[in-house]
Amino acid sequence: MAENHIRSLIESVQLVFSNMVHTEVEIGEPFVRGHIEREEVVGVVELSGDLTGAVILSSAIPTAKAIVEQLSGESCNANDPMFIDAFGELLNLIAGAAKSKFNSGRVIMSVPSVTIGKQVDPMVANDSVCICLPCSTEVGPFCVDIAVCETVGNTRAAS
């Protein structure tokens, strides 16, 4: 994984939370994880093209609910479709802002997929290195993960 991918994601998380959620976010030391921890709310944006993989946003329900309420300015609950849409849109904003800084050629983002429940276990390609950015706000902790490989011709190279 290229250092600029991690740096781009860190900058994007801070920018989106500052401008859209109106709160500061502290980002801890990025670390490699073997698999994505199961959280109660998980959003995934898949990347394809010259860079393949995923950007993943995950948190406990109370934290996700508080962040969505700050983003939308409205009260909600985790069963509300607006909650799922807003959580997905938050991830979309983060991934889109990071994508614009990747310098990895043509990268296509999927529509965010959001699931709720501890049974969620997001999968990433076996040849991807998954980097976790542990994040903290005044309303609680969450994680942003990135697992990508650069596509060279028809082959994939861990970036």
Image (cartoon, rainbow, N blue to C red):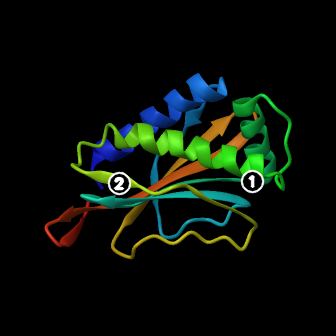
Where residue 49 sits, quadrant-wise, is bottom left
Q: Quadrant of the C terminus?
A: bottom left
Q: Quadrant of the N terminus?
A: bottom left
Q: Which residue is mark 2?
A: 108
At which x and y percent is residue 61?
Answer: 78, 52
Q: Residues within 10 Å of mark 1 (few under 14, many from 20)?
A: some
- Quick one: 153 or 3, which is closer to the camera? 153
Q: Give the residue drawn at x 22%, y 64%.
A: 151
Q: Residue furthest left?
A: 153
The amino acid sitting under disc 1 is Ala
- Closer to the N terminus: mark 2 or mark 1? 1
- Number of the label disc, if any, that sits on residue 60: 1
Q: Give the residue drawn at x 13%, y 67%.
A: 153
Residue 90 drawn above or below residue 54: above
Secondary structure of the residue carrying numbered label 2: strand
Decide if residue 50 is in sight here: yes
Q: Give the residue drawn at x 23%, y 48%.
A: 104
At which x and y percent is residue 19?
Answer: 57, 23
Secondary structure of the residue carrying numbered label 1: loop
Decide if residue 138 is in sight here: no
Residue 122 drawn above or below residue 101: below
Where residue 101 sits, quadrant-wise, is top left
At which x and y percent is residue 51?
Answer: 29, 57
The amino acid sitting under disc 2 is Ile
- Quick one: 157 or 83, which is closer to the camera? 83
In the shown orientation, is residue 109 left or right of residue 106? Answer: right
Q: Give the residue drawn at x 74%, y 61%.
A: 40
- Quick one: 127 or 16, which is closer to the camera? 16
